[in-house]
Structures are given as C-alpha cells and as structure tokens.
Image: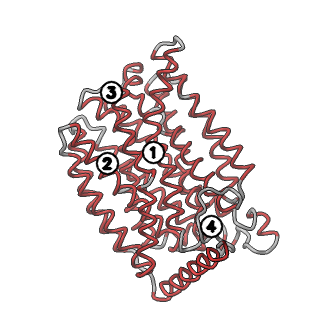
Amino acid sequence: MEIKNKANRIRLFSLKTPQMRAFHFSWFAFHICFFGWFGIAPLMAIVRDDLGLTKTQIGNTIIASVAITIVVRLIIGVLCDRIGPRKAYTWLLCLGSLPVMAIGLASSFETFFLARLAIGAIGASFVITQYHTSVMFAPNVVGTANATSAGWGNLGGGTTQIVMPLIFSGMLMLGVNEAFGWRLAMVVPGVVLFFTGIAYYLFTQDAPDGNFDELRARGELPHAKGEHGMGQSFKAAAKDIRVWALFVVYAACFGVELTINNIAAIYFFDNFELTLATAGMIAGLFGLMNIFARTLGGVFSDLFARNNGLKGRVRWLFIAMLCEGVALLFFSQMHVLTLAIGIMLVFSLFVQMAEGATFGVVPFINKKALGAVAGIVGAGGNAGAVAAGFLFRSEALTYQQGLFYLGIAVILASLCALVVRFSPEVEAEESAAYRNAAAGDETSALSLR
C-alpha cells in the first residue's frame, strides 16, 4: 500500500493538517483506552477486599485483561487495511466503553473476570494508533511519530494510577461506601471513551488525501479484495519470520509494561507498607515516563537510520532491549523504597525506548500488509503480558522472584532483534526514501523562513 503526501515534519502545535489531527487524536484515543483498560488496577486492593479475591484469582483477572487483546489486535490490524483506521477506532472506542462502565455490576470473581476480559478488547487501540501514524508520516520521521503517539498513549497507564484513586476518593466524599465507590468511579473512563470515539469519527480521516473509501473510488488505493484482501494480507505477514521475531521482542517490552501496570500499585502497597494513594502515585511514575521515553526510542531509531539505514534501526532495538533486561534484574533485587523507585525509572526508560524502537522497524517490514504486521507484532505485547501473568499468579513465587525471572526472559528475547534483516534492494530503496523525505523537510523549512 503506497500512500502519497505523507508529512515529513511533525508540527506538534498544529491541528490544521489531516496528518497532525490523526497524530493528536490517535495518541489521545489510546491514552483514554489505557484509562479504561487499567482503570481498575490501582483500585485492586479495595476490589480484593470487596469481592474476597485470592492472589491467584487476581492473577487470573490480570491475564484475562490482556489475553483477549491478542485476538482483537490480530483482527484490528487487517480491519484497518479494509475499512480504515478512522472507522475502526470509532467502533472500538464506543463499543469498548460499555464493559468499562458495566464492570461496576460485578458481584463475584466470575463476573469480575468476565468484565476484565471484555474490557481487554480496547487494548487493540494501540494497533490503530500505530497504523494511523504510519500512513500519515514519511520515513524520516515515522519512527518518531509512531513512538510519540504510542508513548503519549501509554502515558495513560501512568495517569490512571494517579487519577483513579483520586476519582475514587471523590466518590467517597459524596457519601458512598468503598464497595460502591470503586464501581461508580469506573463509570468516568467509560463515558470519556464513548465521546472520544464520536470525536475521532468527526475530526480525522484515514490518509493524507482522504478516507480509504474515497481513495478507492478515485483509483488511488486498491480495493480490499483478492491479493489485497484481509486473508492474503494476514498470510503475507504471518509467513515472514521477521514478523514473529518482532512479536517476541514486543512481548518482552510492551508485555512487561502491561504487567508492571497491573501489579505495581499492589506491589508497592504490600511490600513497602504504603497507603493506596501513595502506592498509586509511585506506580504512576512508571507510566509517566512515557511523556518522553518512548519518543526517545523512536527518535534514536530515526537517527540510527540516518547513517546506517534499516540495519541501524535493528541495532538500536537490540541495545534498548538488552538494557531493559539488565535494569529489570536490578529492580527485582531492590528492598529500599528510594532505590526501588530510582531503578524502576531507569527500567521504565529502557522498556519504553524498546517499544519505540520496535515500531521504528515495523513500517518497513511489508508495506502491502502494514495492518497485518502491526497487528501481529502488537499482539505480541499482550502475549508477553499473558505469559508474564503466570509468574505473578503463583502462590509459590513472590513478586520479586517473578520480576527476576522476567528480567532473564527479556535478555534472551533481545537476541530475536538480530533475526530482523532486510535485502540489499530494500535497504537501498528505504535509504533513498529517507534522504528524499529529509530533503523535503529541509526545503519546506527554508520556504517558511
């Protein structure tokens, strides 16, 4: 799929162009999805007491919240190729708001489990965000655009840890008890999700020159059938070993982030004897690093590509993954609160830079099956979270032991980055495209002076 008129600059403070509207709406929509997806996580200590949940049951709900996303991400990627990211996001946001609000009706482990399972579908929003920015931005800035939109979306994991306890406290101030307060608090992210979906439909478009329906009507984009259909697109991506290598890599970075988002508050609450609000604030710092950390991963990916092409992007991905694994090992051994917080921030930095570096590579794997590639790699993040979830549901392992084993797994997964290679022809083609986009950026900059 060749999309014309991609932006070769990121103008952060502009909403005039369709590229920048897609950029800002996509990161905001993903941010709000995190708000709904993990809204219950910082309140789990209250929910645990209200529903009488065991550690194993809590672990099962964590697994449920990310397991369903694997399937939905695989579907949503090829769906973007078919109906476009605008409609895909609108439907996901509006339908996803329903279980977020309905979780307050849970009265047992089983109903709570089913609600978290249904809510997990909105985690597929990440694929749409990365798809939308990939079709809107040129090779010289696509790594930065993808990393920044995803990073600011992931930031929702941090703001949720801070905001939801405050919303919960606000509900208690209205005079309700804790058992009803957490239920009422979850209505807030559900309402915001629904209205964000409506806004996405009204204010964005699929590509720089229009929506996919319009481009197909003008003959500028092939119809989604035959070799360009959903089935063929998925097959093309699924038979590429590089896609599965990135699947494993993303499992070991985004999967780890999802896991930490789910356990951080209760980990600090139990291990360091903190209040729920304080534990949530500290846990929120992990996600708040997304303000800049994932963007740095994309920026470095683009910088490495300037001199070393696609090989440079892959090399940077390996470095970021290796550093993430080492930092996680150190974090797992911390018993002093201040040291634990400091190492957690270093660990968070490399986790999110590795995520940005991964999607600095994804747009170049197979442009004709971009949605399928993004969907499979994105699903890897949730597969990693499911696998990691089993470490933290076991009564035989402490959280610290689970983190240690997870760090070893990340180091081993970093080697998969080295499997990603490109042919000399593709290397040359993308290097030329990078130079052309960079030259266009310089020309437009000069014209503005």
Disc 4 crowd, CA 10 A, few/some/many (<14, 14-19, 20+)? many
Q: CA distance from mark 1 to mark 2?
A: 23 Å
Taking 93 as reference, is 302 above or below it?
below
Q: Amino acid at mark 1?
A: Val
Q: Amino acid at mark 2?
A: Leu
- Mark seen at residue 54: 3
Q: Are marks 3 and 2 in contact (CB under 8 Å)?
A: no
Residue 214 at x, y percent in the picture:
79, 65
Q: Residue lying farthest top?
A: 175
Taking 260 as reference, is 325 above or below it?
below
Q: CA distance from mark 3 to mark 4?
A: 45 Å
Disc 1 vs disc 2: which is toward the camera? 2
**The N terminus: image quadrant:** bottom right
Q: Nearer the viewer, residue 13 or 129?
A: 13
Lower sequence index among marks 3 and 4: 3
Q: CA distance from mark 3 to mark 2?
A: 29 Å
Q: CA distance from mark 1 to mark 3?
A: 19 Å
Residue to which mark 2 is pinned: 345
Residue to which mark 1 is pinned: 66
What kind of element bears circle 4?
A: helix
- Mark seen at residue 135: 4
Q: Amino acid at mark 4?
A: Val
Q: Residue lying farthest right?
A: 217
What kind of element bears circle 3?
A: loop
Lower sequence index among marks 1 and 3: 3
